[in-house]
Image: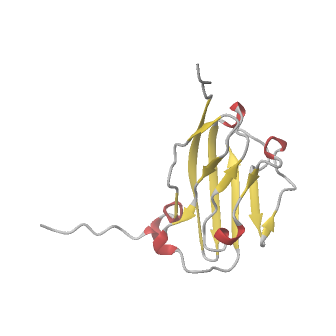
Amino acid sequence: MAAFVPASSSSSSSSNIESDNRFPVANLGEEVLLSCQLTPAETPQVMGDVAVTWTKANLSGVVYKYKDGAPQLADQNPQFSRRTSVFPNAVARGNGSLLMAAVRRGDDGVYTCSIDADTRAGSVDIHLRTAGRSSPA
């Protein structure tokens, strides 16, 4: 029986990025973590400059952008102002996961996380769904 050996991920830059949950469901009013990171095999201890950009389909501006060691929010869509953040220490290790607070119905949709780290870059789509919580009877 032959062993399966996965192909190298160098053929497509998108394969350098992964998410623990590409179809999360968030409760309205709560926070949600949208995961996005370089694949473990590609992630050294600490990298040089890492840029992370989160966008949402059919929305102008960015959801969140982190570059040069700091948030870059000049072109952030106002819908996400003061509700989104990344973890700077994790970004330096190739983790661009986004924390979104106070989830709203309008947050439903397809988000794209793009990471550009040294000579590697890629992106992954996250399909966020929102759900209301029923109150106890």
- What residue is at 50 percent from the left and 74 percent from the top? 42
The answer to whether 39 is drawn above or below residue 77 in the figure is: below
Q: Residue furthest right?
A: 74
User: Quadrant where the C terminus lies?
Assistant: top right
Q: Is residue 120 above or below residue 113?
A: below
Q: Position of residue 8 (x, y in %)?
A: 40, 71
- Image quadrant holding the N terminus, namely bottom left
Residue closer to the observer: 119 or 35 = 35
Across the whole image, how many numbered discs are drawn on residues? 0
- Left or right? Give the position of 98 relative to 40: right
Q: Is residue 109 left or right of residue 69?
A: left
Instruction: Give the quarter of the image for residue 48.
Output: bottom right
Where residue 32 appears, x then y in whole percent?
63, 46
Residue at 66% from the left image edge and 69% from the top image edge? 91
37 and 75: which is toward the camera: 37
Residue at position x 20%, y 69% in the image: 3
What residue occupies the far top of the structure in this picture?
137
Q: Quadrant of residue 89?
A: bottom right
Q: Is residue 135 shown above or below 12?
A: above
Q: Position of residue 100 (x, y in %)?
A: 70, 48
When asked about the image quadrant of residue 49, the answer is: bottom right
Q: Residue furthest left?
A: 1
Q: How is the image coloured?
A: secondary structure
Q: Of residues 51 and 25, which is closer to you in this image?
A: 25
Residue 120 in percent (x, y) is at 58, 72
Query: In this orientation, which residue lies closer to the viewer: 115 or 94?
Result: 94
